[in-house]
Amino acid sequence: DRPGTSRRVRLPAAAVGSGKAHLEFSADGQTLLVASTAGIYLLPVLDNGLVGADWRSLHAEPVHTAHWVPGNASAWFTDDAGLARVTAGDAAVRVAPGISWQPAGAQGRSTIRAGRVFDATNGAYRIDHDVVIENGRIVAVEPWTAEPSGYFIDARDKTVMPGLIDVAIDLDGADGAGPGRSLLAHGVTTVQAVNGNEPWLRDLAERWRAQRSGPRLLRLLRWCGADAPLEDTGPVLVAGAVEICPQIEASAAKGATLARSRGLAAWSSLWLTAASGLADTLRLPAGDPDTARSLIVGSGTYYQDAIDAIASSGVVFAPQLSAGALPLLLEDFPDLLAGRQGTALLADWRPDGGLSKAGRGRLTSRQRITGRISAGGGQIAAGSGNSYGGWGLGLHAELRALALTGIGNGAVLRAATTGAAGALGLQEEIGSVEPGRIADLIIVGGDPLVDLRALQNVEAVLLDGELTPIETLLGDFGIVLENLTLSDSLTDHKPQRAR
């Protein structure tokens, strides 16, 4: 056909099926390939340019799309089972591509001109500083000088800080892009899942990454000693920590040693394990934390002694205050649902479970213990646990609950940044605004060191240096894809104000 012209083709009903059909002429122009829910059919092209009716079937099962293999003797196609190749007269041969894909990170150089930078290395701001990003990593944090050249984000009346990290999140029910978008909209750029099977988590992680619709997804692994190594033998997601299983926990008092795998951080839910030095990170037992008394009976260690040992051991403590207490915290802090994220993404959501006197007692006990450990010099990491589907909101509730322990807003912010990164063993990659770190950042309006409510005032999120405005995250999912070239503007080399 001449350029700019088109041809109307009438196809046999058997070759079309339901829905749309994919058409492709062979390189020599003599055969038309038709791919649809009816399978793959080949139709001859006559000398007068019309398509003949003497069709033949190449593949009889539904396909999504198909393309000629050079030489016109066979075709590639995709269906629900993946990729395959078929030749006339032969059965289809399945092909394992053996490839993976992820969007390229931000390329080039860009600058965020910030009024306040919370770098998470201490409890103070750097005032009037530029955060310089190159190829997705931070290369400098320096005072304002001349107007930056090239692309920059104007955040002179904003606070720039590390993206929030949730070290222990229950992702049950988190299917699709919606939960990931809600997490990002709340400023959460990294989460560690404590539940879910590997194939499901891998699919969710790849979907979030490919569509830029969710945070980094890490997986908590379990270690059960030399005779029972990591529970999964195949390739896994990027893993931040290993949970010590009960067999090792039970032998902690006997001086057991932990065979660390892949240099990952180690977790425990038992106080004695952490106090014995076998764990890098401690989680509270699922029940009443005062049951820790029973864990140390016969060990010669008293309750306060266990707290002191944990505080001074260098173990990172993840109290998960909001786990099981989210309804209570929403009662205490109704503004958590009043922000833009709650209005746009969680308007019809409320957590299951009611308020109870026993639940209040457990929360108060956990807060008291957390405050003691922090006062003794212990390190704290923030994890939301089961947030009942309030994706991202659970971590903000956790931080509000931490503030009530009396540790101060600076320590609260570090619990979701540097402290959390340390609990995952990723302190050299994420969790702070320092040269060499991945540019996982959030831009917030207001001063979260003065008022933690400002932490929900997320204006934009950067993941691997890629900027996504809050308006994109709060809109329909289609807008996320539609605006990629706009929100992905760290490579556009033109000023953009973070509104």
Image (cartoon, rainbow, N blue to C red):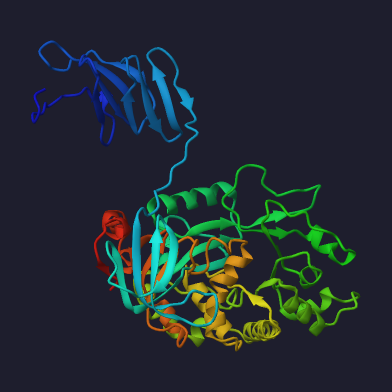
Query: Residue 495 appears at what percent x and percent y?
Result: 25, 66
User: In which quarter of the view is residue 334 placed?
Assistant: bottom left
Residue 278 seen by the camera: yes
State left or right for residue 58 relative to residue 425.
left
Residue positioned 54% across, 75% down in the render: 121
State left or right for residue 21 relative to residue 203.
left
Residue positioned 12% across, 16% down in the render: 49
Query: Residue 127 appears at what percent x and percent y?
Result: 41, 81
User: In which quarter of the view is residue 132 placed?
Assistant: bottom left
Q: Which of 255 and 286 is in front in this view?
A: 255
From the viewer's perspective, is residue 96 above or below residue 218?
A: above
User: In which quarter of the view is residue 192 placed?
Assistant: bottom right
Q: Nearer the viewer, residue 392 or 21?
A: 392
Q: Which of 339 and 92 is in front in this view?
A: 339
Q: Where, quadrant-wise, is the N terminus in this rendering? A: top left
Q: Where, quadrant-wise, is the C terminus in this rendering? A: bottom left
From the viewer's perspective, is residue 474 above or below residue 335?
A: above
Query: Residue 195 appears at what percent x and percent y?
Result: 60, 58
Q: Residue furthest top?
A: 47
Residue positioned 47% across, 36% down in the render: 99
State left or right for residue 279 relative to residue 70.
right
Residue 38 seen by the camera: no
Q: Residue furthest front?
A: 145
Q: Nearer the viewer, residue 145 or 206?
A: 145
State left or right for residue 229 relative to residue 397.
right
Query: Residue 107 appears at what percent x and percent y?
Result: 36, 53
Q: How many numbered circles does the render carry?
A: 0
From the viewer's perspective, is residue 391 above or below residue 134?
A: below
